Amino acid sequence: TKIEVWAVGGGGLSTAGSGAGGSGTAYKILDVTNLASATVVVGGGGMAAGQVAAASSFNTSIIGGPGGNTSSHTTSGVGGTASGGDANFPGQDGLEGDGSPPAGDRHGGGDSWFGGRFGLGGDTSADGENGCVFIKEYSDPSLVSGGSLVPTGVVNPYAGATAPAGWL
């Protein structure tokens, strides 16, 4: 059995006029035929209440890092890193403020590569979003190992006759 894993860290916290960094995203396809169990950790987003943005991981080796915090009106939080995946995607940096944003002026938090709200960095003076660990199982490992996508057991409607070119 093979699984597809996406580990997405928590988004950074913004306590000022610039956006915080989006989290890193690690992607991997694993053969889990002989894996009895695995540790999954989902990283929370940075929060003004004191929670620091945290990494998400699968089996401690596939890691989506947290987005960077910012407490500045002119410096954004940096995007998080990722490691252990077949593909490792950095998070997007937050958008920088202009030094003294007027009321209602927003400077967006960075996105994670996974998308949606997962791992989104905090907008102007806002908490970051939680990360996630997304796991999808493939019951047919040939679908992710370069195997054929031609179904087995196809009935040939032209049995005993001449089939059109390209059919079976």
Image (tube, rainbow, N blue to C red):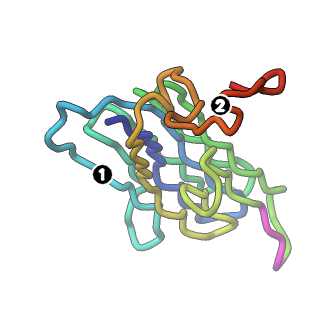
Could you say whether the residue bearing mark 1 is in a helix, strand or loop?
Answer: strand
User: Which amino acid type corresponds to the residue marked 2 in the rendered image?
Assistant: Ala
According to the image, label 1 marks what residue?
41
Q: Tell which of 85 and 73 is nearer to you.
A: 85
Residue 158, percent from left and from top: 71, 33
For the record, the magenta segment spans 103-107
Q: CA distance from mark 2 to mark 1?
A: 54 Å
Q: Nearer the viewer, mark 2 or mark 1?
A: 2
Residue 128: which quarter of the image? bottom right
Q: Is residue 102 left or right of residue 58?
A: right
Residue farthest along the left direction in this orientation: 36
Residue 106 colored in magenta in the image: yes
**Residue shown at the point (44%, 44%) measured from the top left:** 7
Q: Which comes sooner in the sequence, label 2 or label 1?
A: 1
Q: Is residue 107 left or right of residue 134?
A: right
**Residue shown at the point (53%, 64%) measured from the top left:** 129
User: Which amino acid type corresponds to the residue marked 1 in the rendered image?
Assistant: Val
Q: Residues within 10 Å of mark 2 (few under 14, many from 20)?
A: few
**Residue shown at the point (23%, 32%) measured from the top left:** 33
Picture quarter with the C terminus = top right
**Residue shown at the point (55%, 35%) measured from the top left:** 151
Decide whether the magenta segment is chiefly helix, strand or loop. Answer: loop
Q: Residues within 10 Å of mark 1 (few under 14, many from 20)?
A: some
According to the image, label 2 marks what residue?
159
Residue 107, percent from left and from top: 77, 61
